Image (spheres, rainbow, N blue to C red):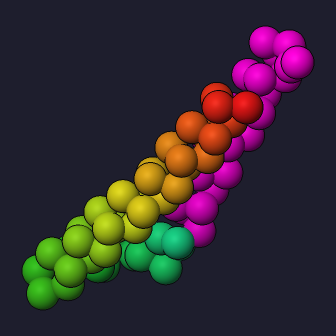
Amino acid sequence: MKTFKQFNEEVGDIIKGGISTFLNKNKNVSVGDFINPEKRSKTIDKIKSRGKNVLSNTLSKLGDEIGK
């Protein structure tokens, strides 16, 4: 059985991994993509979509960890 500290560390690692994944997927987004009106909505939609995917994966991993 895990201690609370071990559990807390694993949950923290899962969340950090999710944040890192989100940032890596969006590292090619530039300020110009938001300033340019033609690209703005497409850029925002891409970020939202990637955010939802990463969040669902992260929550799934958290659920698996809690279920252990």
Q: Is residue 12 visible?
A: no
Looking at the picture, how far across and down is residue 28, in whole percent? 49, 79
Dividing the picture into quarters, in which one does residue 4 lie? top right
What residue sits 54% from the left and 47% below the top? Answer: 60
Dividing the picture into quarters, in which one does residue 33 lie? bottom left
What residue sits 67% from the left and 51% below the top? Answer: 17
Task: From this view, report whether residue 3 is shown above or below residue 51.
Answer: above
What residue sits 60% from the left and 62% below the top? Answer: 21
Quadrant of the frame with the N terminus: top right
What residue sits 50% from the left and 43% below the top? Answer: 59
Foreground residue among 12 and 7:
7
Looking at the picture, how far across and down is residue 19, in whole percent? 57, 50
Residue furthest left as drawn: 37
Q: Does the magenta portion include 50?
A: no
Foreground residue among 14 and 19:
14
Task: From this view, report whether residue 66 is shown above or below residue 36.
Answer: above
**4 relative to 42 in the view: left or right:** right
**54 relative to 45 in the view: left or right:** right
What segment carries the magenta color?
A: 1-24
Looking at the picture, how far across and down is residue 2, in whole percent? 86, 19
Residue furthest top as drawn: 4
Which is the main secondary structure of the residues drawn in magenta?
helix
**59 relative to 37 in the view: left or right:** right
Foreground residue among 31 and 22:
22
Looking at the picture, how far across and down is residue 48, in whole percent? 29, 63
Quadrant of the frame with the C terminus: top right
Q: Is residue 61 visible?
A: yes
